[in-house]
Image (cartoon, rainbow, N blue to C red):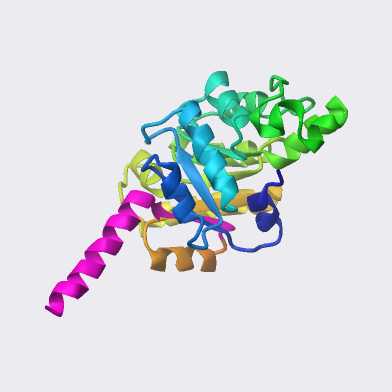
Amino acid sequence: MKNKLAEKLKTNAKPIGTFFELGSPSVIEALGRTGLDFVILDNEHGPFEAESSRDFARAAETVGLTAIARVREVSRPAVLKLLDVGVQGLIVPDVHTVEQVRQIVEYAKYFPLGKRGFCPSRKDGWGFDEMAQQSVPQQMAYWNEQTLVIPQCETVGALEQIEEIVALEGVDGIFIGPFDLSISMGIPGQFEHPDFIAALERVQKACRDAGKFCMIFAGNTSAVTERFRQGYDAVAYGLDAAVLTAAYQANLTEIRSKL
């Protein structure tokens, strides 16, 4: 299955996604009818693992959403299982060193970029999809292209080594976590602080220089448009539970004001 998010990133289509926390395939199906481009299955903060992520990836496919996942940790099982059940990319949190990113690439990408274990799985119809009929080198090249590896820049360690991190072969882009990055910098939530603004500009420049994309989180609609104006390639807008709650609050406030 082609990675629609990867294609949109290549064409500057300004894809918008959201974090998925509620843990129901029905929520995924509903999100697929909103105009969103991708969902991030949050295995770090969400209450689910690879087995349920499989069901969420399947639901996303039925409604044309690209399902990527935020892994729970930098480990081979945490990376490999999510890819084998069908997610099309990985956001990797709590990155501090270049070596950690090399490990991520090793786990997530096939030879010659990495050492991902080769096995038929749900991602390729357990060996019965069309691509699985190609030679092993062709299959590995295809999945390396279709699988997005996206380290998060949310620590001072990652920020200080961002140029080397984003230049690594097998890294497709960077996702900025503004809250944790500001906390790591000792200026929690101070998004207008000169040091924080300079940090964001440094990450964006490193991505541009390396020919990689740069994604960021935004908590409200105004922030989404502002981030695109600032040159980000994709934005993750809020999380499903928060947007749902805010929508009901706004609607109920309007209703009650008219009673």
Residue 105: x and y in percent read 65, 29
Q: Tell me where the magenta segment starts and ends, as one range.
A: 232-259
111 relative to 68 in the view: left or right: right
Q: Quadrant of the C terminus?
A: bottom left
Q: Is residue 247 magenta?
A: yes
Residue 126: x and y in percent read 70, 26
Nearer to the camera, 55 or 207: 55
Residue 148 in the image: above or below residue 5: above
223 relative to 60 in the view: left or right: left
Nearer to the camera, 235 or 26: 26
Nearer to the camera, 134 or 39: 134
Question: In the rendered image, is residue 70 in sight?
Answer: no
Residue 237 in the image: above or below residue 54: below
Q: What residue appears at the point 55 percent right and 40 percent down from the top-left corner?
A: 57
Name the outermost residue toward the bottom.
Answer: 258
Residue 202: x and y in percent read 54, 51
74 relative to 20 in the view: left or right: right
Q: Quadrant of the N terminus?
A: top right
Residue 62 in the image: above or below residue 12: above
Name the outermost residue toward the right.
Answer: 135
